[in-house]
Amino acid sequence: MKSRVLKLAERVVERADRDHPADSVLRLELKGRHGLDPSETTDVARSVFCYFRWKGWLKEDQPLHERIAQATSLARRFSDEPKSFTDDDLVTHAVPGWISRELSLTPAFARALQTEPTLWLRSRPGQGRQLTEQLGKCRSFGSGPLADTLAYSGSEDLFLTPEFHRGEFEVQDISSQAVGLFCAPSPGETWWDACAGEGGKLLHLSDLMSNKGLIWASDRAEWRLRRLKRRAARARVFNYRAVLWDGGARLPTKGKFDGVLVDAPCTGTGTWQRNPHARWALLPSDLEEMKKIQIELLTNAAKAVKPGGKLIYSVCSLVRSETAEVVHGFQGPNPDFNALRIKNPLTDRETSSDTISLWPQDFGGNGMFIAGWVRSQGAGP
């Protein structure tokens, strides 16, 4: 007889498709718990993610429960003996073959995708060491601002901790934190987080600004802005205004900003380590559609940058269509925006180009692309 863990994992896998991402289906299925204890809940999630992470090795004609069991076995083997998988084997099976036309599909990248993701935290400024002592099982990524970037290796449900409810930290990937550091806002400035979503990057911008100045937050979905409001209240962030914006030419405010962040919607190829189901749901045609949306968002949001202000573009994607091609598509028609050269925030080293690509194998976080421009001082309104 199948265990209830395996039955529920099969249920999630069967229901997951392009319109119903596996992580969303999993959350809904686990909401009622189905009588599972916490360890069984963890096993269900691990089984589902193992299945999609190792899907390229599985035979579709096998019964689903056998494929899930094989995927779990492959994950254990990779954890215990990573060198038992050849580079060619990983590059061939870890992702769909067509993606090699869009990014550099190296053995190091493929190995990173098959590795369990790191859980990253961002403590309040200057509180990294104290939070490490409180939570335990944490290590700091670096010094200075990066001392507040922590990798958590424990098993506790952090969302239930008193530290979380007191707003002492956020669960935020290191690459997302790099975006905020790249923006480098100053206290007292006015910024616009144009695609704010549920507010992860906005909360970081506010901390970097010492909760001073003003941040406009916009999104096309009202339910995301409602969640942003709850998160901001818990984090004690009050220097923001939230407003709906559909990404069109009509902007939510006539004001001009010291900085505008366009953390654009994307295909999420940079999250394939953390979200393996997305590897198999993406189609090549999706890339061109997203590129058009991203260029349109950048073009419209750029109108709100004051002369001398910064425009920052970021996506958790590494494919050329959503990175270099978007930069080219925006830069040509907007000559009053000059490329912003800045240090890589995770290495503190000058970059050799006008853009930054953060790869999972280099920093242990999501893949992320960042580009920035400064508007010419003589630019018109």
Image (cartoon, rainbow, N blue to C red):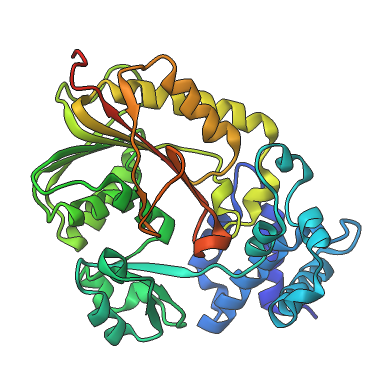
Q: Residue at x 43, y 56 (%)?
A: 175
Task: Please give left or right for residue 208 compared with residue 154 in the image.
Answer: left
Residue 352 shows in this picture: yes
Task: Please give left or right for residue 194 compared with residue 83 in the image.
Answer: left
Residue 109 is situated, as x and y percent measured from the top left of the image, at 65, 57
Task: Please give left or right for residue 31 compared with residue 22 in the image.
Answer: left
Q: In the rendered image, which quarter is residue 370 located in?
A: top left
Q: Quadrant of the N terminus?
A: bottom right
Q: Residue at x 19, y 71 (%)?
A: 126
Viewer-proximal residue, 335 or 27?
335
Q: Quadrant of the C terminus?
A: top left
Q: In the rendered image, which quarter is residue 204 located in?
A: bottom left
As drawn, which residue projects farthest toward the right? 61
Residue 274 is situated, as x and y percent measured from the top left of the image, at 56, 60
Measured along the vertical axis of the image, is residue 275 above or below residue 31? above
Residue 318 is situated, as x and y percent measured from the top left of the image, at 56, 44
Q: Residue at x 75, y 80 (%)?
A: 81
